[in-house]
Amino acid sequence: MKPFIDLQAQYRNIKEEILICINDILESSHYILGKNVKSFEEEIKSYLSVADAIGVASGTDALHLALRAFNIGKGDEVITTPFTFFATVEAILYVGAKPVFVDIDEKTFNIDSSKIEDKITPHTKAIIPVHIFGYPADMIKINQIAKNYGLKIIEDAAQAFGARIGNKKAGSFGDIGCFSFYPSKNLGCFGDGGMVVTNDLEIAQKIRVLRNHGSPGRYIHETVGLNSRLDEIQAGVLRIKLKHLDEYNEQRRKKAELYTKYLSNIVITPEEQNNFYHVYHIYSILSQYRETIKETLLRHDIPSVVYYPIPLHLQKALSFLGYKEGDFPVAEEISKDILSLPIYPELPDEEVYEISQIILRCLQDS
């Protein structure tokens, strides 16, 4: 079976640099909140043009801490999308708030900004737009809505490191931006890791305290926080990968362009609005023959993945929210037809062509 994402290919290209870095950290015996974390935070600040960046243990924790920093909790509502990974909603539930879903745009798969205002109530405190698959949400309009209603914006940019609208990068539009460095992400470490970014230095300090057991100083605890610290080894690995990130994202975009060139006449392929820079964490097509395509690819030892087969409002774990089938028809329809194809920077162009040809032949025979 060919890989859906070949992490070994990326590692081989930077192996020597990675091993030197890890060895230096092991020799130093300084593993938590050391110089690599501090340097990585500074480098992220520069890359995203934000005032502060705080390394945390995961993307989920980044969202959780962001909500905590704004004192969002029981009785509050947070607007988000039903078409995202479960962690987006988990973070809202962790603080005792209520997730309120808004359907998605059928072309971008992001939250439909034209439908957000209808869901705002006196209990609404924040909006969490998700830059799904590496494509930025409509942040210009979402920011305006938030300003009009006095709401906080927490960007879930877990899949979108390096994505941008114009020259402004995903994660830097809202009050807080949250990132995941899970290994398969565009900027991925060798385990779990995350980052919170903000232009509000007071909020940044609050998150720094919260991530470290509520402690601003050794054995002093101002509040009950979390143990959510990005470790030195992960920070060291991420510093090396960050230097290559723009190149990696450009390579992803080239693979996506090839897929679209080969497949756009027979399936629905991703669209990219003018001035939006998609980084293709995931490349997804839409077809009513999804299962046929998936089975055909599998017979050729090519994996494909369905992101996401069940929208969040229909997940058993969230049944207590009272949503039902038909509440968000666009998300439900997309979930029935979507299929994600292998994409990563080192994916050979010939394999993109091969995968595309298998799909073309499959659908011509259907």
Image (spheres, rainbow, N blue to C red):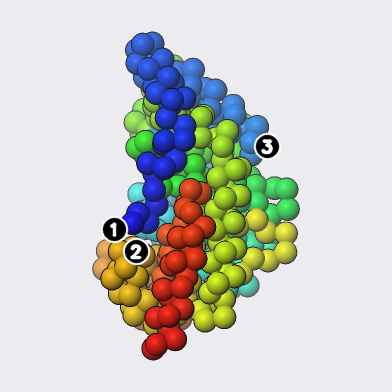
Residue drawn where x is 43% and y is 80% of the image: 361
Asked if one can make out residue 362 in the rendered structure from this viewpoint, the answer is yes
User: Pointer 2 and pointer 1: residues touching (CB < 8 Å)?
Assistant: yes
Question: Which residue is label 2 attached to?
Answer: 302
Determine the residue positioned at 52% across, 81% down. 266
Q: Which residue is disc 3 drawn over?
A: 49
Would you say the residues marked 2 and 3 are in contact, meaning their CB atoms lie under 8 Å apart?
A: no
Residue 35, percent across and down?
A: 49, 17
Residue 356 place in picture, x, y as percent:
47, 70
State whether residue 1 is above or below residue 169.
Answer: below
Position of residue 133 measured from the top left corner of the image (x, y, whole percent): 50, 59
Whole-number angstrom distance, CA of label 2 to CA of label 1: 6 Å
- Asked if labels 1 and 3 touch by Cβ distance under 8 angstroms, the answer is no
Whether residue 68 is visible, yes or no, is no
* Marks 2 and 3, the one that precedes in the sequence: 3
Residue 341 image-quadrant placement: bottom left
- How packed mark 2 is, by other alpha carbons closer than 10 Å (few <14, some 14-19, many 20 or more), is many
Give the spatial CA distance, label 2 vs label 3: 39 Å
- Which residue was labeled with disc 1? 1
Q: Nearer the viewer, mark 2 or mark 3?
A: 2
Q: Earlier in the sequence, mark 3 or mark 1?
A: 1
User: Circle 2 — which element?
Assistant: loop
Disc 1: CA contacts within 10 A as few (<14), some (14-19) or many (>=20): few
Q: Is residue 17 above or below residue 143?
A: above
Q: Which quarter of the figure has residue 107?
A: bottom right
Tag shown at residue 233: none
Q: Nearer the viewer, residue 4 or 220?
A: 4
At 48% from the left edge and 21% from the top edge, which residue is drawn?
36
* 167 sits left or right of 262 in the view: right
